[in-house]
């Protein structure tokens, strides 16, 4: 892959009303976020998370499936087979300096080693928080993902990325992993 093929941006993946609905619908049931290996360490990640499935959010799930198919066909061309994990909603709060240090989403567990594509959707308007940038380092240079509400950022799950410390307000994001046989 060439560096410029290491990520894809889709503006307006979700409309504002849908972003609002996801935030208000799921904000009350959030727990402390874990790491790729299912451990917690607040120096690495400080955020609250929750999950939703296809039955809970059929329209959003359909949209994600369509976007993934489109981006995979046009950009990545990975061998993807399934969605082995529910969608994650995360909240990073300025009060707690919410962040997620540099990491790859490919981990050691049976499910994390099958992650191949990561999709993050910005659920909050950039006016709602300070800091909290999603940054990618696909090829030795740090790239700031667009913050515009409703924008989706796609990247191979092995690509290093982080959420910089949030210094004010609340940033909500949606993360979906797409799975397949591990790279070989
Ligand atoms: O919240 C984000 O923008 C990224 C979340 C993330 O990297 C993860 O959950 O693995
Ligand atoms: Fe991640």
Image: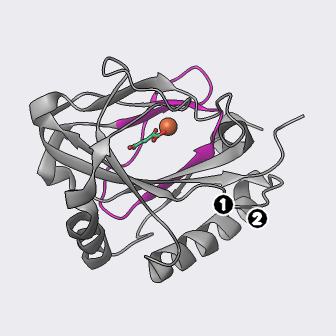
Question: What label does residue 55 carry, if any?
Answer: none
Q: Quadrant of residue 165?
A: top left
Q: Is residue 35 visible?
A: yes
Q: Is residue 124 visible?
A: no
- Indicate whether residue 155 is drawn in magenta: yes
Q: Quadrant of residue 110?
A: top right
Q: Residue at x 50, y 68 (%)?
A: 53
Viewer-proximal residue among 64 and 45: 45
- Indicate whether residue 85 is drawn in magenta: no
Left or right of 63 in this view: 80:
right
Q: Quadrant of residue 96?
A: top left
Q: Earlier in the sequence, mark 2 or mark 1?
A: 2
Q: Residue at x 67, y 33 (%)?
A: 109
Judged by depth in the image, the label closer to the viewer, 2 or 1, is 1
* Coordinates of residue 40 in the picture (x, y in percent): 40, 26
Q: Mark 1: which secondary structure?
A: loop
Residue receiving disc 2: 73
Q: Which residues are magenta?
A: 134-161
Quadrant where the N terminus is found in the figure: top right
* Coordinates of residue 51 in the picture (x, y in percent): 42, 57
Viewer-proximal residue among 169 and 107: 107
* Coordinates of residue 91 in the picture (x, y in percent): 26, 46
Viewer-proximal residue among 114 and 14: 114
Left or right of 171 in this view: 74:
right
Residue receiving disc 1: 83
* Coordinates of residue 97 in the picture (x, y in percent): 18, 28
Note whether 123 is above or below 129 in the view shown: below
Q: Given contact means CB atoms under 8 Å apart, are the residues at marks 2 and 1 in contact?
A: no
């Amino acid at each position: 892959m060439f560096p410029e093929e290491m990520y894809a941006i889709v503006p307006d993946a979700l409309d504002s009303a849908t972003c609002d609905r996801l935030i208000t619908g799921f904000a009350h049931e959030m727990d402390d976020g874990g790491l790729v290996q299912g451990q917690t360490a607040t120096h690495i990640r400080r955020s609250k998370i929750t999950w939703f499935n296809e039955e809970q959010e059929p329209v959003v799930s359909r949209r994600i499936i369509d976007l993934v198919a489109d981006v995979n066909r046009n950009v990545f061309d990975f061998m993807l087979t399934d969605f082995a994990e529910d969608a994650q909603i995360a909240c990073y709060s300025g009060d707690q300096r919410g962040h997620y240090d540099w990491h790859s989403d490919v981990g050691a567990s049976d499910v994390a080693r099958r992650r191949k594509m990561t999709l993050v959707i910005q659920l909050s308007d950039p006016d709602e928080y300070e800091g909290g940038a999603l940054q990618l380092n696909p090829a030795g240079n740090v790239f700031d993902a667009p913050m515009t509400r409703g924008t989706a950022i796609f990247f191979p799950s092995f690509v290093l990325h982080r959420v910089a410390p949030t210094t004010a307000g609340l940033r909500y994001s949606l993360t979906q992993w797409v799975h397949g046989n591990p790279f070989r």
